[in-house]
Image (cartoon, grey):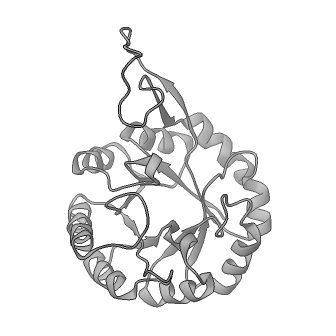
Amino acid sequence: MYKFEICANSVASCIAAQDGGADRVELCAGIPEGGTTPSVGMIRCARESISIGLNVIIRPRGGDFLYSESEIREMVYDIKAAKGLGVDGLVFGCLCPDGSVDMENMRLLMEAAGDTPVTFHRAFDHTSDPFKALEDIIELGCARILTSGCRPTAAEGAPLLAQLVEKAGDRIIIMPGCGVNEGNIAETARLSGAREFHFSAREPVESGMTFRNQDVVMGSEEDPYGTMQTTARRVAATIAPLRS
């Protein structure tokens, strides 16, 4: 009845997602920015490493979802590259300044995607009218919408998620994501009626470095000697309440 997608920030996270029983991963770079397009090398290595579904986010930068002409062109190139590497799905979304779905640029990206299924990502949560956006996204032919119900977390957005699930019917999949974990997934499923869920199941992973210069950090990192990665243990624990 249920399907589970893991937001994976590395090849190691992809493998952990598969080992934990997930159905699909959404491969992203730039997780602190909300997810950006991963490198060709990461996509290729992920495809070689897992047999479950592999979706790839196409997002040229963090920030808003109002894209310039050159950014749209970059996204088209990334879509074609990802398809050439054998991905199973693509994840993107574009908005107009007024918070409506950018139908013109979305059609360009959908044309580039061709038969590859598309998820409209959490740009949906920044739309000015989610019900109008729902109909626009269905018209575009997207396979699903990733959303937190326009709230900080999917658990908080469950009331709107339930309305979206009802209005969507069998026309498109509504997939709750953001803050979904082993403690709230069962209740979020009960309240929303959703059948697909998106979560990261990450835990801190300590660096193997023995020499550490604590005076230097990279970019905005507070701790350059640790990473957050998906673990099979947390994937399995989060899935368990709905698979039992």
Residue at (51, 55) in percent of width and height: 23
Residue at (37, 14) in percent of width and height: 213
Number of marks drawn: 0
Which quarter of the figure has residue 234? top right
Q: Position of residue 173 (x, y in %)?
A: 57, 75
Q: Nearer the viewer, residue 171 or 95?
A: 95
Q: Position of residue 157 (x, y in %)?
A: 71, 66
Q: Residue furthest top?
A: 210
Q: Nearer the viewer, residue 191 or 147?
A: 147
Q: Where 189 falls versus 22 (above or below)?
A: below
Q: Position of residue 135 (x, y in %)?
A: 55, 89
Side of 217 relative to 188 (left or right): left
- Can see residue 169? no
Which quarter of the figure has residue 238? top right
Q: Position of residue 162 (x, y in %)?
A: 73, 75
Q: Nearer the viewer, residue 108 or 96?
A: 96
Q: Which quadrant, please, contains the N terminus?
A: bottom right
Residue at (23, 46) in percent of width and height: 41
Q: Where 244 falls versus 13 (above or below)?
A: below
